[in-house]
Image: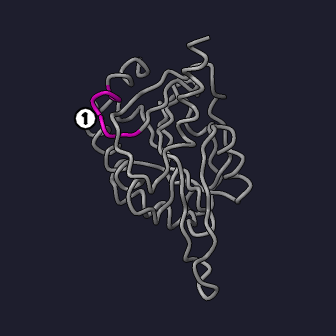
Amino acid sequence: MFKIKTIFTALSLSASLFLNTAVLAETTIYDIKGNLPDLKFDLKKIDNDHFTEKNLQGKVVLVFFGYASCPDICPTTMAELSELRNSLSKEQMETMQIVFISVDPHRDTPKVLQAYVDAFNNGAIGLTGTEKEIADIAKRYRVAYQIGKPKSADDANNYEVMHAQGIYIFDRDGKARLLSSNGEDTDKIKQKLETLFN
């Protein structure tokens, strides 16, 4: 009973860690094996090419939900994931794939999103979709986010987005294995990843 309660506390983490809270707590990594569905999606990457979980077969996949104009949590996490990737061996680098899924599909076109992730030089793939597609995948992995109303009637693109922070880690078979509260302690995440590369 305690284990189940702990797992669901971990999963509800996404609902409580919002971007404007500036929460920089110690990195906690939860074992979520068997508590979230397998990796599955059908979204778009640059040039509007469809991209699914099948394109990631055999990879250890780190998924982060955010948006390109995020002022703090997203760039910080992406920089930390770059540090993590650079600490791996060449073989491990080739086996790991970072995926950044936008929760702001109105502003984040595939081109905008890929340009954003490319700035971090970590080989990440930026993915987006329709509002419904994003809502569906967020629901699948219990990711909380909220898009605010435009601040001005004259500028429909001027609005705030709140979203949970957390890095979802899937093994080479697409099974959900780990949930990291953030990317701050890259050594701790790397240690956990070691078991998934084998």
Residue at the spot of label 1 = 87
x and y percent of residue 111 in the render?
Answer: 52, 66
Quadrant of the snapshot with the C terminus: top left
Write the start and end of the magenta stretch as one range. Answer: 182-190
Is 157 above or below relative to 109?
below
Between residues 190 and 31, which one lies in front from this camera angle? Answer: 31
Q: Amino acid at mark 1?
A: Ser
Percent x, y for residue 121?
A: 33, 53
Residue at 56 percent across and 65 percent down: it is 108
Query: Residue 32's image quarter?
Result: top right
Quadrant occupied by the N terminus: top right
Q: Residues within 10 Å of mark 1 (few under 14, many from 20)?
A: some
- Tell me residue 137's x, y (percent): 67, 44
**166 and 42: which one is in front?**
166
For label 1, the SS is loop
Quarter of image, res 191: top left
Residue for point 64% across, 71% down:
149
